[in-house]
Image (spheres, rainbow, N blue to C red):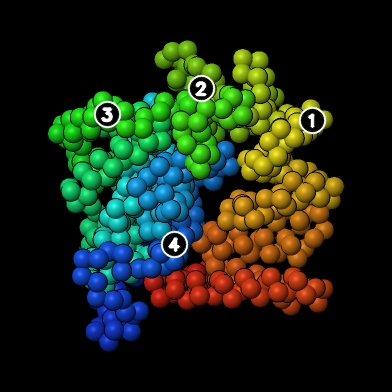
Amino acid sequence: MRPTLAAAPLALALAFALGAALQAPPLQAQERRQLPDIGSSAGAVLSPAEQAEYGAMTLSQLRNYDYVLEDPLIAGWLQSLGQRLGAHSDDPRQPFTFFMLRDREINAFATLGGYIGVNAGLVLEADSEDEVAAVISHEIAHVTQEHVLRAVEQAQRDQLPVLLAMLGTIIASQHSSSNSRDDAVMAAVVGAQGLMAQRQIDYTRSNEAEADRIGIRTLARTGYEPEAMAGFFEKLQAVVRSTQTRESMPDYLRTHPVTTTRISEARDRARQIADNGAGFVPASRALDNPLLPASLSISPGTASGAGSEFAWARERLRVLSANTPAAAVREYERLARAGELDDAQRYGFALAHYLDGSPAQAARELGTLLERHPGEPWLELALAQAQARAGNIEAADARFEALHARMPRSRAVALTYAATLNERNTREAGQRAQALLRPLLNSAGDDPSFQLTFARASEIAGDPVRAGEAYAEAEFLNGRPERALVQLGLLKKRDDLDYYARARIDARIAAITPVVLELHRQGIRDKDLER
């Protein structure tokens, strides 16, 4: 697990703010935004728009403190998997956003607005995409059945700020097995007020049973193996048995206890679905397009089957979630001593070498793998990066251009190519990077990595206004909206702005200002700016 020094300020802020919220006098409590008396109707706690806002704020704050693993290939794989499941859930109209966290703890969670986080450790523990899908379908059910909203209802009744309650729970779970020097700080969150916040987000046993039942149905509808949930539960039960104390148990297993009865019920439910033929389509025939029926078969050359990317994604996660590239290299060396590496693991080993400063060695290994898996995008992208870093620019650009021609709408291809061009720091490279990214501005505008890459491309291309706008957007998406306003304010002072640029900047200031005010109301401020 990576060092978590950046978490200390957030942990202290949470502990302080939660304490202040719980100890506030009656008058202060009355000044908070009043919510309707909703009885047992969870849907009246927050409007769908407010739920989405809180979900987005939670994700941005997790990004602010470096919990989120930002990688276009991983994000694309996870979004594709999650959206297929969401489209076959009990509420296909519910929007979902899926994101990966770098922590190797086994964990997944749902927050307001359909925002669902998955830890790298959960994927590393899984043996198939079906098992990952089983956990995500369970979390989707927590959203569609309004379990998250009911938990927030209780937090509101106890006058806990919603955002702080959610963040306190997530941060506590991410650090449940941490040995870093932040343990004392994290204890301040998990203990006292922080622990009280965590209790409000926990689910009841009936919630868990309902999420299992509906999640298995979603698995079958999407084309994944319904038995995968029981199979992964058995794996988690083995983790429980090997854990010496409850304190060292992964947080997911404390909040989602796995029992023999639960495993048996999951297996029985899967068997009933299989016996009834309730929509199960093998995942190899499911499509990436969630708007089309899973039973529709098309030629393999048009779309990859669900699960075909899992092995590449898992090994890429193994590298990117390691403390350092050198630690990833050592991990693969240990795996190689234990037995022969499969091709996906060899890909991960090559990627670790690339990130550890040996691009030529990585290029050789990736070239050999491509002979066995011709045209595989995960390998092609890695090889192009390695060739560029090793100085073979002509070969790298040819490979990138061929990939982009073949996959013109791929965010991963465009971002990876543009980031490689940005490293050259020339006006020509910046202009080419801009051209690659500009068609994706509407679809990828909520991706901070995209905004940072576009900002740098615009900067070296000689377009300072577009660069400033993109840098401000990246600050906003990364949980620093006050800095985004500062950046936009500085841009407004330029005397070379045209009408359209000024209108865009004014519109973003108007949109971001209420977010800053809400974060202040929730007790979250940018301490660096205050200093």
Of labels 2 and 4, earlier in sequence is: 4
In the image, 326: left or right of 122? Answer: right
Q: Which residue is mark 4?
A: 52
Q: Secondary structure at mark 4?
A: helix
Quadrant of the snapshot with the N terminus: top left
**Foreground residue among 217 and 405:** 217
Residue 287, image x and y in percent?
51, 33
* Label whose residue precedes the other's in the sequence (3 or 4): 4
In the rendered image, which residue does mark 2 sit on? 345
Q: Amino acid at mark 2?
A: Gln
Q: Which label lies toward us, 2 or 4?
A: 4
First-in-chain label (3 vs 1): 3
- The residue that appears at 62% across and 25% down in the rendered structure is 301
In the depicted structure, whether residue 455 falls above or below residue 508: above
* CA distance for labels 1 and 4: 42 Å
- Image depth: mark 1 or mark 4 in front: 4
* Camera sees residue 354: yes
The image position of residue 483, as x and y in percent, is 58, 68
* Mark 3, residue position: 276
Q: Amino acid at mark 4?
A: Ala
Q: Nearer the viewer, mark 3 or mark 1?
A: 3
* Front position in the image: 223 or 448: 223
Question: For the residue marked with disc 1, what is the amino acid?
Answer: Ala
Secondary structure of the residue carrying tag 3 is helix
According to the picture, the residue beneath numbered tag 1 turns out to be 398
Precedes in sequence: disc 1 or disc 2: 2
Label 3 to label 4: alpha-carbon separation:
37 Å
Image point (79%, 54%), residue name: 460
Mark 1 packing: few (<14 Cα in 10 Å), some, or many (20+)?
few
* Of callouts 1 and 4, the N-terminal one: 4
In 3D space, how far apart are the residues under numbered discs 1 and 2 (Cα atoms)?
26 Å
- State the separation of the CA atoms marked 3 and 2: 38 Å
